Image (cartoon, grey):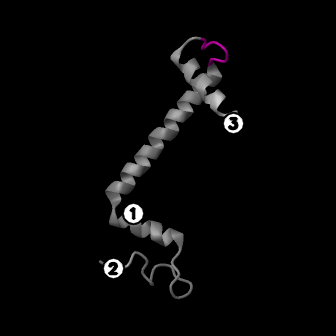
């Protein structure tokens, strides 16, 4: 098994490999893991976006609901 950072990948001086080159090599080595990571990130971002959109759209209306309780918990943890 060869080293993770090869000398011929975007080097500017001996022993240096850019972060972009390391990322590209990692994606090429384990495309399945990179795909799962990208999908997980997309699901998380879209869930946070939807939650934010619902909170903004229903200002003050969500009293006593599960979403209101979650929002209250988030707001109380932000203080410290």
Read off the residue under disc 1.
27
Q: Give left or right: position of 32 versus 14.
A: left
Start and end of the magenta stretch?
A: 58-63
Name which of mark 3 and mark 1 comes first in the sequence: 1
Q: Nearer the viewer, mark 3 or mark 1?
A: 3
**Viewport quadrant of the C terminus:** top right
Say which element carries label 2: loop
Name which of mark 2 and mark 1 comes first in the sequence: 2
Q: Give left or right: position of 10 versus 59.
A: left
Say which element carries label 3: loop
* Residue under the point 56% across and 19% down: 69
Read off the residue under disc 2.
2
Q: Judge the density around disc 2: few (<14), some (14-19), many (≥20) Cα neighbours within 10 Å.
A: few
For residue 66, above or below residue 36: above
The single residue placed furthest to the left in the displayed view is: 1
- The picture places residue 45, in percent across and down from the top left corner, at 52, 40
Calculate the distance from the C-alpha at mark 2 to the C-alpha at mark 1: 16 Å
* Residue under the point 53% across and 74% down: 18
Name which of mark 3 and mark 2 comes first in the sequence: 2
């Amino acid at each position: 098994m060869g080293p993770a950072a090869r000398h011929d990948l975007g080097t500017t001086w001996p022993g240096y490999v850019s972060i972009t080159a390391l990322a590209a090599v990692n994606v090429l080595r384990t495309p399945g893991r990179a795909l799962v990571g990208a999908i997980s990130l997309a699901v998380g971002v879209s869930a946070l976006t939807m939650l934010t959109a619902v909170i903004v759209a229903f200002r003050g209306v969500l009293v006593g609901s599960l979403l209101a309780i979650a929002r209250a918990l988030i707001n109380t943890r932000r203080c410290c």
